[in-house]
Amino acid sequence: MITYLQGTLLLDEDDQSIGVLANGVGYQVTVSDRDRTLCGARGRGGDIALFTRLFCRGDGEPDTLFGFMDLNDRVVFDRMLRIPKMGPATAMKVISALNREQLAETILAQNKKALVGIKGVGAKTAEALIECLRL
């Protein structure tokens, strides 16, 4: 398990991931839109530190390393993965769409409409998100 990664920002891999060089090894890390913007501000060669979660699919597809600049975002990500049928891509879309304060307000207000507006989140998933994150 890779739980933390500290190194040098290599480059943007694609719209969702960045490259990180740590101790001579390059990692492709999927990050939220918000963290991607923060990484971009540091520029190539900048220092980067990420709390990570390795997601192993087990279906022949490549494993994915998810990274978070804030530990609380990883905690929320992990809690969302406990929801049936909630995959890591959808959980990352929620984190990208709503910052921590917005997500907390949405959960406290039980605002399903705000969650259903996020790609991949339907009415049942929105209800499950509210229930799971309210605790």
Image: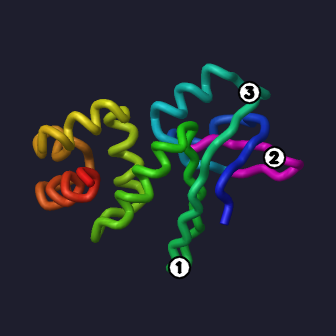
Q: Name the residue at 12% across, 44% down.
A: 110
Between tags 2 and 1, which lies in front?
A: 2
Position above or below: 8 against 122: above
- The residue nearer to you, when weighing 70 against 117, is 70
- The residue nearer to you, when weighing 37 against 82, is 82
Give the overall secondary structure of the magenta segment: strand
Position above or below: 71 against 101: below
Q: Which residue is mark 3?
A: 44
Q: Which residue is mark 1?
A: 58
Say left or right for 110 vs 6.
left
What colouring style does the render use? Answer: rainbow
Which of marks 1 and 2 precedes in the sequence? 2
Which of marks 2 and 3 precedes in the sequence? 2
Position above or below: 10 against 27: above
Alpha carbon separation for disc pair 3 and 2: 14 Å
In the image, the segment drawn in magenta is 17-27
Q: Give the residue type at disc 3.
A: Arg
Q: Quadrant of the C terminus?
A: bottom left
Q: Which residue is mark 2?
A: 22
Q: Quadrant of residue 115?
A: top left
| Residue 118 percent location from the top left of the image | 24, 43
